[in-house]
Amino acid sequence: MAVHHISPMLSLRSLILVASLCALLVVGVSNALQADDSGVRKNAKVTYDDQVLALLKRRCSSCHSGDRTEADLDVVNFVALMQGGGSGAVIEAGAADDSYLFRLVNHDDSPAMPPSGGKIPKAEIKLLRDWIDQGALENADSKVKKRKPKVDLTKVSANLNARPDVAPALPKLSLEPVMWTKRKSPVRAIAVNPWSPIVAITAPKQVVLFDTETLALKGVIPFTKGIPEVLRFSRNGSILLIGGGVAGDSGIVLVWDVAKGEVVQTIGDELDSVLACDITSDHSLVAIGGPKKVVRVYSTADGALLYELNKHTDWITAIEFSPDGKELASGDRNGGLIVSDAQTGNENFDLTGHKAMVTSIAWRIDGKILASTSKDKSVRIWEMRKGKQIKTWGADGKGVTEICFLPGGNLLTTGRNKNVKLWQQDGKQLQTFNGLGDMGMGLAYCASADRVVAGNFQGEVLVWDRGSPISVGKININPPPISERIIDVNQQLVTARQNVDADHRKLKNHDTMLDQMTAEVSDMQNRFADTKKNIDDAKTEIESAKKTTQDARSKLKKLNQELAKSETGISGDGDSDTDDSDVASSKAQEDAEALKLQRQQLKAEERLVTELDNRMTVLNNQIVAWDGAAAVTKARLAELQKETGRLKDLRRPLVEKLETSRAEFNRLGNVLKFWKAEAVFANGQK
């Protein structure tokens, strides 16, 4: 059996090797724990040479490399890749979502890649996104280049503060909120477009846009970089600055094009949130500031930092360029207020006077006056020829938070006293706008609608007409998701349908009652008419009977006379002597027959007169009865006609209520269609 001896030197080397391997293993495990699904450490620099080349070789090189470069695109050569292919550039350094190659790989555009149809793994898509978003670096020694803005922001009219030929108008924007919370967050900033009825208001992770005339939601701008803290429209209204970030971690300013409805540039890469920012009227400079006590001024041409202002002793809390863009005013948490030359950063004036944090500053439109507010409860007015204070007054007993100028030179303020006030420049109060309810946070004036907009600590935003102290309405800066709106409208539609059905039943029942009443009225009218006809017929018959009776009585009288004469004649004939007894007997018999006939006629006439008298008595009794019935019928008819009139009067509001219910049902139907269309649009924007 052979025995192998290990030399001491070899043993030492083996121990060192084992220790090194263990150390590497520990580092590898540590790195793995810090890596995401793509295998890249979180926050690690992603480069073409180190990670992306291998991915592109694996997924794309069969069609886009070497001798086979479909669409003239070579992905295994960095320079060739950055130059692009037959369709132009495919990589937009710093913006994966704008990069054609990434959009094809992510199936956001067509033709989807790879052509097999299925997406590559999510980890690989994320690796590609991170590489492009980090600047599309070639290797570890490469430097990130500033991305040029999508548009030339400095193309503005010669008169920088005049109304533009075409007032800024919003394009179609998604109304889907980035997030919704059960409780509203404090309003951090409000800005109104100087030439359009558009107000922008901060909310968690987003900026919401509303119409100041209708108070309707017009769009949602995502702010995924943290919390938006400050908003500024440019003086011509075409640009909206959105500044903010994550406290103690990062800060940025988004340059949002109003007409395009998109972010066209990002400014700054701060180590803390941006609390104040502004853009010059010619759009050439953007100034930002925050907890780092430094004001930084950037060029919009390339996003490069031009200079820094380091004279503040505390957080930068307010920034505003003069209307002509030549001066820059900045305030801090220690009460400092400095006016500098906007182009050089040289100090023009150090405006001393505030004893606490400067909360807001505003230039008058002519640039000759600067107004400032502070937690020290004061408003201070400064003239800018010599940098002297010309007026101060206590505008809020607990501290002023916001100030803004109106076009005519008057001022609006709000603060901890929970109201908004309108002032002359000499400190004379003109009006109080009531109902704010909590500490004012955010204030603006909309010239297009002639309205005042202010927010508070509870996240409420109120709107007033300038001439009225009573609010005309509120703006909900925490709009619910579109899916919730659709559910809510559907529920309202169910209720509205029930209301329509109920109102229809009420009207139908009412019409049934009205029809019955109308039929009864018609019946009563017919009965009354029949009774009147019977009375008239009876009266006619009585008149005829009276005439007949009169004739019968006359005839009866005549018959009586003739009968009496006949009886007298017969009696006289009996006393005469005659020899002709047969003749006498015959004549007597004839006279007797004639007398009998006369008596029969007399009795007949007497019976006729009696019958007529009886008939007239009956008719008169019937007329009395019919007159009574007619009176009753007439009274009942009057009651029915009155009740019918009342029912007709009651029908009108029932019809109007049904029409209102149907209109509301139709309105909700249109609202539902609107929100369903908005849901489709919002899904298309994702």
Image (tube, rainbow, N blue to C red):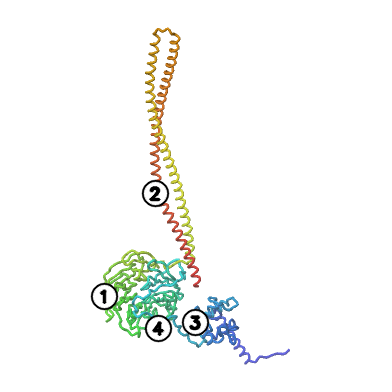
Q: Nearer the viewer, mark 2 or mark 3?
A: 2
Taking the image as drawn, is residue 357 in sight? no
Dot 2: element: helix
Q: Nearer the viewer, mark 4 or mark 1?
A: 4
Report crowding for label 1: few under 14, some 14 to 19, many 20 or more residues within 10 A (C-alpha).
some
- In the displayed structure, 35 sits above or below 491; it is below
Spatial CA span between label 4 and label 2 = 74 Å
Spatial CA span between label 4 and label 3 = 20 Å
Spatial CA span between label 2 and label 1 = 67 Å
Residue type pointed to by label 2:
Asp
Give the labeled residue for mark 1: 391
Q: Nearer the viewer, mark 4 or mark 2?
A: 2
Dot 1: element: strand
Give the labeled residue for mark 2: 649
Looking at the image, tell me whether mark 2 or mark 1 is earlier in sequence order.
Answer: 1
Compared across the picture, whether 73 is left or right of 620 comes to right
Q: Which mark is residue 383?
A: none
Q: Nearer the viewer, mark 3 or mark 1?
A: 3
Q: Quadrant of the N terminus?
A: bottom right
Give the labeled residue for mark 4: 299
Q: Residue at x 45, y 48 (%)?
A: 511
- In the displayed structure, 640 sits above or below 252; it is above
Give the labeled residue for mark 3: 92
Residue 453 screen position, x and y as percent? 36, 69
Looking at the image, tell me whether mark 3 or mark 1 is earlier in sequence order.
Answer: 3
Q: Quadrant of residue 530?
A: top left
Q: Quadrant of residue 375?
A: bottom left
Residue type pointed to by label 3:
Glu
Residue type pointed to by label 4:
Ser
Dot 4: element: strand
Taking the image as drawn, is residue 595 in sight? yes
